[in-house]
Image (cartoon, rainbow, N blue to C red):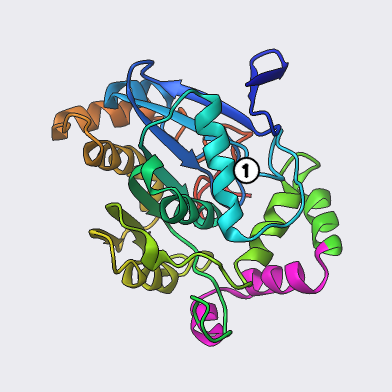
Amino acid sequence: MTTSAPDLLTTATGLAYRVQGAPDGIPVVALHGTPGSRFSGTPSRDALHALGLRVLTFDRPGYGDSPAGEPRPVRALASDVVAVLDAAGLEGPVGVLAGSGGSAAALALAAVHPERVAALTLVWPVAPCVDEPGSPGMGRREWLLDMDDQQRGLHGLAVQDPVFLRDQLELHLGAHAGAEGIVTDLAQVQEPWDVDPGDVRCPVDVWWGTDSSVSPAGHARWIADRLVSSAVHRHELDEHQWHVRRLVEVFATLGERIGARPRSAEELAGAAALDAGGGGCGGDALGGCACGAGGCASSA
């Protein structure tokens, strides 16, 4: 671990990360969505403490204080998570949570390094769009179903003119909004994955809703169906912006999968009250959208 600025924790490869929650809590690593940062995608530190969780978050490459680097196969993304776990001194299995664009790295970690993952939670996961025979992925027509025109256009530009898209994102979102990371995420999901969700064997919770045109429900259903070697728990919710109001519940559920004491309804309500106005779905102005589902006030 190195520190390049006061209070900035980084791995040997320069990935910026953050630790919050209960110092002796059960460890969880959370991967933000598209967009996002190490400051988004989790309940507040007080809420995490109440849940008995110690949570690591990090800026995925191209976001926040982490360098962009070169595009890599999905399997190689697992090394980023391993680097963060190693830097934090966590050698055993942990809970892993990922939102939208972070899904690929989380699935890769669970498939390639099963000894590091006790349980996996995916929130609004994004499936790969691949028509190539033999590579896991959705057909393009199915992949585009229920995706709005803006998202279709962004994904198209990420492949056809990534430099133009990066410049436009920086112009409209700001120089520190993670434009490099956004473009990489949008392009990578349209390329063949060298990891099959079917290789994941740990318990998996998949959370999604029916109302997003940013992360269509069909993607989550495809991934849930593909997790043939796992004990899959499906959470399909017909509730607008459920991911904002139920983030504490999502983390509590993952905590129970990996050994945290089950919380009563009253305890969950108390933890949610601690989260009100705090962290939550990108509540920090630096955070962006926690999961990439869009539609919440903090989403870009």
Q: Position of residue 86 (x, y in %)?
A: 52, 29
Count of numbered marks: 1
Q: Is residue 294 visible?
A: no
Q: Quadrant of the N terminus?
A: top right
Q: Is residue 243 magenta?
A: no
| Residue plotted at (52% across, 39% down) | 82
Q: Which residue is mark 1?
A: 60
In the depicted structure, whether residue 11 falls above or below residue 161 = above
| Residue plotted at (31% across, 32% down) | 272
The amino acid beneath tag 1 is Arg
Q: Position of residue 79 (x, y in %)?
A: 58, 44
Pick the front one: 291 or 127: 127
Pick the front one: 80 or 140: 80
SS under mark 1: loop
Q: Is residue 206 visible?
A: yes
Quadrant housing residue 95: top left
Magenta part of the chain: 139-162
Q: Position of residue 271 (x, y in %)?
A: 28, 27
